[in-house]
Image: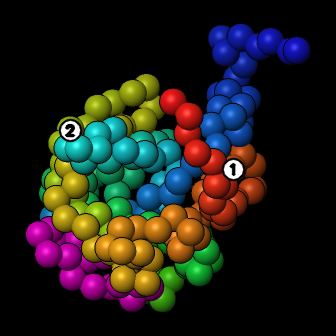
Amino acid sequence: MPELSADTLDRDENARLIKTAVTPRPIAWISTVDADGNENLAPFSSYNYVGSSQPVLVFNSPSEASGRMKDTARNAVDTEEFAVNVVTEAFIERMDRTSERLAPDESEFEAAGVERADCRHIDPPRVADAVVTMECTLYDAIEVYDKVMILGDVRHYHVDEDVLTDGKIDSRKVDTVGRLGGPYYTVSEPLEFERGF
């Protein structure tokens, strides 16, 4: 079995290895607004939850070549609010369109043809047809090498009734899109397995 030292690999080699090994990675489709009220919507595949009984989400954003934070991270830090929209198969192409680099005053909602809806407790809009949206307020922001790790307290959930069974989210009804290594994505298909421990 090959063994590799991370210290001997260049940045791209390390990135390729870890992004292929840590899969599937869920995608946070994050909506924010800046201090002037300009909307932003962008996907992040370095995302997960940190706390569950006290729900906290985390996403990581790379810095731009200039060292400046990307719009989403900067907006989340400056306004202390963001919404995480769950990406399902029907939205994969529009989600990809929101990766396009636009000027801060241009809306990815408009550019990608994504319908918006108001959130209850925060200013950023949410993706109207997302099966789940989580409204977050900033818990903390931590610099980790060339990335900023954004942690958000979940304050409110929007859940589509179509993905519920007996009032609970049913994984069999949520075709979540995940990121794999390279150009690959996957759609979740539940595997029935009863935990023994």
Q: What amino acid does circle 2 point to?
A: Asp
Q: Is residue 69 left or right of residue 102?
A: left
Residue 132 in view here: no
**Residue 126 inside the magenta-drawn segment:** yes
Q: Disc 2 marks which residue?
A: 140
Relative to 107, residue 87 above or below: above
Q: Give residue 143's position: percent from left, percent from top.
A: 33, 30
Is label 2 in a helix, a strand or a loop?
Answer: strand
Q: In this view, does 174 lie to the left or right of 154?
A: right
The residue sitting at 40% across, 68% down in the picture is 169
How crowded pointer 1 is (Cα within 10 Å; few <14, some 14-19, many 20+) is rated as some
Specify the farthest residue to the right. 1
The N terminus lies in quadrant: top right
State the extent of the magenta-drawn residues as a range.
114-131
Specify the farthest residue to the left. 121
Q: Give residue 122's position: percent from left, percent from top.
A: 14, 68
Relative to 142, residue 55 above or below: below
Which is more toward the observer, 31 or 119?
119
Disc on res. 180:
1
Relative to 76, residue 37 above or below: below
Q: What amino acid does circle 1 point to?
A: Leu
Q: Give residue 40's position: percent from left, percent from top.
A: 34, 69
